[in-house]
Image (spheres, rainbow, N blue to C red):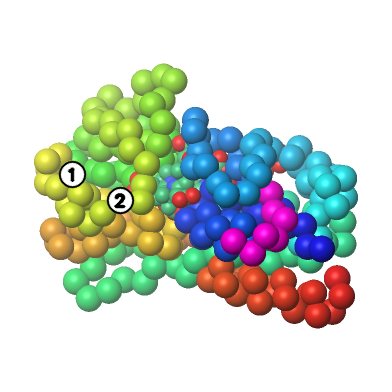
Amino acid sequence: MPNILLLGGTTEASALARLLAARGISATLSYAGRTGNPRAQPVPVRVGGFGGVAGLADYLRDHRITHLVDATHPFAAQMSAHAIAAARLAAVPHIALTRPPWRPATGDRWNNVPNIAAAVGALAGPARRVMLALGRMHVDAFAAQPQHHYLLRFVDPPDSRPALPRHSLIVDRGPFTAGGDAQLMQAHGIDLVIAKNAGGTGADAKLVAARQLGLPVLMIDRPPAADRIEVYRPEEVLVWLAHDADRGV
Ligand code: 3Y8
Ligand code: NAP
């Protein structure tokens, strides 16, 4: 009988959890514990780190996990690297459920940068009104460009005031809508949007809104892809599981 560990925190992970629950396939969804009240799931949930590669390999053995599905975010590079290493150590089949990177469409005004530090560097110059839709984890890096007014959007209220002298803070969780994001950008007089190339449908509203308003986007490219099997749709994970079952795993 399969017993899946699903590393979650994304729309695709939640969609796969629903498919597994509907088929009565045993699965546990794992959150890092980054947000206060993560979405409820139709399968058992565990929250918090595993304690590195060794901790995850122990978890796989101790809980008799038969398949490891990494459905974390494309920028969760450390978790994904640990998943590959721990699956190998524990000899557990591993697959990544991810989403293709966004590609610019007609009318998009993108400027691609390789990482957060390069995005900060690209902000040198006169004050602008910048929508920083990166969540809470990377905000402090932008204190190096304090001249701008930043519109911040966090999932949870921050424990301390963000270290940016001029900012507005929205506490809201996605998925968002293009209409809602366009209204937000106009209300705050935004003239530049900064986004991570997360891919998927839960965070692309701001890109559609920026296109509609003719605003430039500073797009942060995702870390280089790891050497692993990748699928883009939850149904493909079920095919992969069935294939393993045929091989009598
Ligand atoms: C804790 C679990 C689901 C998953 C929903 C998706 C869609 C809505 C849009 C903007 C961009 C951002 C951020 C975002 C979106 C989905 C998805 C997605 C982007 C939750 C969740 C967890 C997280 C972690 C969170 C990070 C943050 C990133 C906010 C739950 C709500 C900016 C990513 O300390 C923090 O505030 C941490 C924030 C990590 C920053 C980052 O580094 O990217 N995601 N987001 C997961 C865990 O503990 O393991 O609370 O329910 C999940 C979702 N957030 O089940 O329906 O993309 O799948 N998440 C980005 O795209 O750049 C918001 O504001 O426009
Ligand atoms: P990260 O930097 O790659 O991981 C840092 C450490 O956090 C990992 O080594 C691991 O700790 C722990 N961790 C990460 N994901 C975990 C999970 N699903 N279950 C248990 N432990 C986890 O990851 P991150 O960028 O902080 O992202 C954290 C979580 O937020 C991920 O689950 C990711 O999917 C989610 N996220 C979602 C979005 C989105 O837009 N949907 C964006 C970013 C992040 P140990 O080393 O102790 O095991």
Amino acid carrying label 2: it is Phe
Q: Quadrant of the N terminus?
A: bottom right
Up-down relation of residue 219 to residue 156 (above or below): below
* Mark closest to the chain's N terminus, 1 or 2: 2
* Residue placed most toward the observer, 71 or 136: 71
Amino acid carrying label 1: it is Leu
Q: How many marks?
A: 2
Position of 246 with respect to 124 (left or right) is right
Distance from disc 1 to disc 2, alpha carbons, whole Å, reads 11 Å
Position of 23 with respect to 134 (left or right) is right
Cβ of mark 2 under 8 Å from ligand 1: the answer is yes
What span is in magenta? 22-28
Residue that label 2 marks: 176
Which secondary structure lies at badge 2? loop
- The residue depicted at 56 percent of the width and 68 percent of the height is 234
Q: Position of residue 33 (x, y in %)?
A: 58, 35
Up-down relation of residue 142 to residue 62 (above or below): above
Which secondary structure lies at badge 1? helix
Q: Position of residue 35 (x, y in %)?
A: 50, 34
Residue that label 1 marks: 184
Task: Let me know if residue 24 is in the magenta part.
Answer: yes
- Mark toward the viewer: 1 or 2: 2
- The residue depicted at 28 percent of the width and 64 percent of the height is 110
Mark 2 crowd level (few <14, some 14–19, many ≥20, 10 Å Cα): some
Task: Let me know if residue 199 is in the magenta part.
Answer: no
Q: Quadrant of ligand 2?
A: top right
Q: Can see residue 249? A: yes
Cβ of mark 1 under 8 Å from ligand 1: the answer is no
Up-down relation of residue 53 to residue 35 (above or below): below
